[in-house]
Image: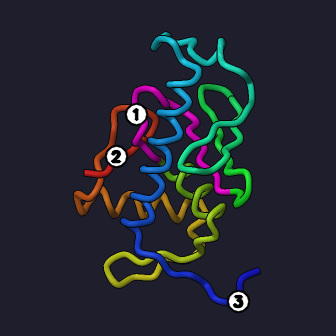
Amino acid sequence: MKSVVEIKEVLPAIVDFVETQKQLVSAFIQEYIQNNQSDYLINCPKSGYLNVLNYKWYFQRHGNGVCFTEHESGQVVDVHVKMLEYPDAFDAWRLSQYFESVEIEQLTYKMDILEEVNEENVIENLLKRLLKDKVIQLLPFHNLYKLL
């Protein structure tokens, strides 16, 4: 357990997540997906490794998505729905999983400190606030969001 809690700004934290996710999805598509059919994951390996961003990432298919875990740090990017259509999208669950895996415990937004950011309901409330402030937009599927 860390003795000092890192407090990170919300927007740079989300940008870090989105950029990492885009790189992982791009590498996965390039390596394993030949077309954009709805059953695109059926012909992909259930699990394996990719080298992305100078790191070794383990991936595991599940449902309509893929969970990526960086081999050494344990950083998690779980793209659980609409991976091809929205490679830069996020939702509360994705962000909470990511923040927990990179050990971000607190975020700041407009002078407010948000605690327990690995809890999905805390992130859901944050996303509602970012949507209201026109920092993000709601996409037409499964409560996915995108940075503006």
**Image quadrant containing the N terminus:** bottom right
- Residue 146's label in the rendered image is 2
Q: How many marks?
A: 3
For residue 11, which quarter of the picture?
bottom left
In the displayed structure, 114 sits above or below 14; it is below
> What residue sits 67% from the left and 46% below the top?
56
Kindly report the distance in space between the C-alpha atoms of the residues bearing marks 3 and 2: 33 Å
Q: Secondary structure at mark 1?
A: loop
Mark drawn on residue 86: 1
The numbered dot on residue 3 is: 3
Query: Cα distance, mark 1 to mark 2?
Result: 9 Å
In front: 95, or 126? 95
Q: Residue furthest bottom?
A: 3
Magenta stretch, residue numbers? 75-90
* Magenta span: chief secondary structure: loop
Q: Where is residue 69 shown, x and y percent of the image?
A: 68, 48
Tags 1 and 2 in contact by the CB under 8 Å rule?
yes
The crowding category of the residue bearing disc 3, from other C-alpha atoms within 10 Å (few below 14, some 14 to 19, many at least 20), is few
- Residue at 66 percent across and 13 percent down: it is 42
Image-based side of 107 in relation to 104, left or right: left
Q: 142 and 11: which one is in front?
A: 11
Residue 46: give x, y in percent of width and height.
Answer: 74, 24
Cα separation, mark 3 vs mark 1, equals 37 Å
The three-letter amino acid code for the residue at tag 1 is Tyr
Residue 130: quadrant of the picture: bottom left
Mark 1 or mark 2, which has the lower sequence index?
A: 1
| Kind of residue at badge 2 | Lys
Instruction: Classify mark 2: helix, strand or loop.
Output: strand
Q: Residue at x 71, y 83 (%)?
A: 2
Could you tell me residue 88's position as x and y percent? 40, 42
